[in-house]
Every structure is written in C-alpha cells, then in structure tokens.
Image (cartoon, grey):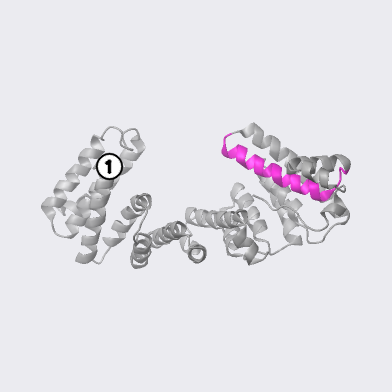
Amino acid sequence: LLARTVGAGLLAVCVPLSAVQTTAYRDEETLWRRTLAVVPDAWMPASNLSAMLLERAARSADAGLIDAARSAATEAEALASTAIAELERGGPADEFAAWLHRAEALRLLGRPAEAIEAIDAAIARAPDQPELAWSRGRSLEALGRATEATDALLAAAAMPERIRADTVRGDPGLVARRSARQADAVRLALATGRGTDAIPVLELMLREAEARGDRRRRAETLAQIGAVHATSGDAARAREAFADALAPPADPRLMVRVLPMFVDVLLAPPPDAGRADDALTAATWLVGASGRSDPMAHLLRARALAALGRSDDAQAAFAEAERLARSPMPGSPIAADAALRERIELELERRRVEVLGSNAAPR
C-alpha cells in the first residue's frame, strides 16, 4: 500500500548481518523488529515496519476487524514518528516515506487534520510524488472538503510515476496503487458532479489498459467514459464509448451493467429507427439474461418498441414491467428490496407517457 525505503545504505543503518543471520530474517517484520531492538532510533527500519503495519491495518479494516486495524495503525504512527524524529536530526533531504506513513496512520485513526499536516511536510520534501497528493486528497475527503479533495485526487491521478517505467510495469503493487489513485479520482469527481473533469483520467486509464493488453480493464474504462458522457448529456459520445466497450467478445456481466445505459442513449433524441432497432435487440437480451424477471429490462424493451411505432407490443411489454414491479418473482433482486421496488415504480410512472402516448392515464 505504501512505499518502503530500500537502498545501498541499509546495512550501514542496520546491524550487520551474516549470511546465516540473513537466512533467519526471511520474515521481514522480524528483521525490522530485531534491528530496532538493537538500534531503537534507526529511521529506516522504523519507517519500513510502519509501512508493513499500515498494510496490516488496511487488511484488518477491510475484514471488519476494527480493533486490530486500530492497534496496527497506532503502532505504525508511533514508528513513523520515531523515523521522522531521527530524519530531522540528520537524514536524506528528499526522504518522505516516514511522513507519508504517519499521515496514512493518522487518517486511519480518524485524525485527518493531523494527517494533512504530516503530508504537507512530506510534500515539502518531495513535491512531485503522486502518492503524497493521493494521501492528501483522501484526508481532505475525510474532512468533508470535497472540492479540494477532488482537485488533489485528480492531480495525483495525472502525475507520472517518479521511478523508472520498467519498474512500474514489472511491479504489480505499483500498478495496483496507480490504478487505485485513478479510481479514487474518478469516484470522487463523479460523486461531486464533476464527471467531465474525470474524462482525462479515464482516457489515461484507457491508454494504459490498451498498452498492457488488458481487455477487461479497457472495456470497464470505456463503460465509465460512456456513463460520464451520458450523464453530461453527450449521447453521441456515450453511444460510441458503450459500443466499443461491448464489442465482442464482451463479458456478460459487463453487458448486464452497461446495456441499460446503452439503450437509454440509443433512444435519446433525435429519433432514429436504426438506433431504436439496436435498442430493442439489447433490451431483449437483457430480458432473457434476467430470466424474464427484471421489470426494468421489460421497460427498456417497451421504450424501444414505442420508438419503433409498435404501440401494441410496447403496451404489452410495459404491462409486464408493471406486473413484475408489483409482484416480483420469488428470488429476484427486487423481491426483498422495498426501496428498489419504489425506485422502479417511479421510473415506470416517469416513462408512462413516452411508452403509451399522451393519452396514457396515470396509474
């Protein structure tokens, strides 16, 4: 999750290790703990052990083990503070990892204002490190400062790595962190109504997925680009992105998520019979994929049929959507979700005139 300090100076800082001792220290945590027992103020092992504990804290938090996460983050913060104190007495001027580790520990401990102070000290040492802008953005988000957080996360996502490109390509952890920075930026930009600001990041993600030959990530990113264009009202670009995302061989799970949005932009004004026919094909596939149990798939099909002027068929499909919304099939996703059923009923009412015509009576 976080960078550890490595380098030729390791043995100068830590106690010298014989070949036999090195074999005994295959457990990296044991190595750093035993080194600190001999040299309590050594900054490098304190910083590296702090990074390991932060990884443990994050895994514990993801697993719902809150006490374990807090314990690991608390120890990580103390070790990072030890490393910082030693570095301030005399260490590499561009070393920033200890401040980053302290900031992340403080954020995990629910102290984001202090985390920002720590990360600002790190940025003063290494202003162009994307990990630092990412950390600052996450702490700003925790403070509720959404605009500043979005700016920071977008900046972090756009920053190049400050290590060799061949190292980035060869290290799955670095690729994963870069992907996480990009995903955080897109997530918050969308949540704050700044979807168009996320487009450059998404386009960068698309280029990187294509360079890696990652077909799944490429399709997922195209689907996100399409969704942003759809939300911003650019139906033409949304259709183009969705069509590219769904190009064969498409993952059926992706199709289930993307086709409803694709149908919506296919049916966007101005009317077009060819697009309406494509929308009908897609909606019919969704009806089948759901085992004919999804009222929204039937509604999409009704809308496509109405756009093609097939009013009787549209009315029948709409009636089936209403029936399934009122009496869900056992085991269907909406059967036990009253809030979802309410949203579907609202959407049915919103689309009633579109499907049934201006004379349609409200339910």
Outermost residue to the front: 20
Quadrant of the image occupied by residue 160: bottom right
Residue at left offset 76%, top offset 51%: 98
Q: Which of 196 and 93 is in front in this view?
A: 93
Q: How far from the left and from the top, in percent, is residue 118? A: 73, 51
> At numbered mark 1, what does the secondary structure look like: helix, strand or loop?
helix
Q: In this view, does 185 lie to the left or right of 271?
A: right
Residue at left offset 62%, top offset 42%: 58
Vertical placement of residue 129 versus 296, above or below: below
Residue bearing the label numbered 1: 345
Q: Is residue 50 left or right of residue 355?
A: right
Q: In this view, does 136 lie to the left or right of 191?
A: right
Q: Mark 1 is on which residue type?
A: Glu
Q: Which of 97 and 264 is in front in this view?
A: 97
- Which quadrant: the C terminus? top left
Residue range in magenta is: 39-64
Task: Give the dominant element type of the magenta stretch: helix, strand or loop.
Answer: helix
Q: How far from the left and from the top, in percent, is residue 331? A: 31, 33
Residue 191 shows in the view: yes
Q: Which of 174 and 287 is in front in this view?
A: 174
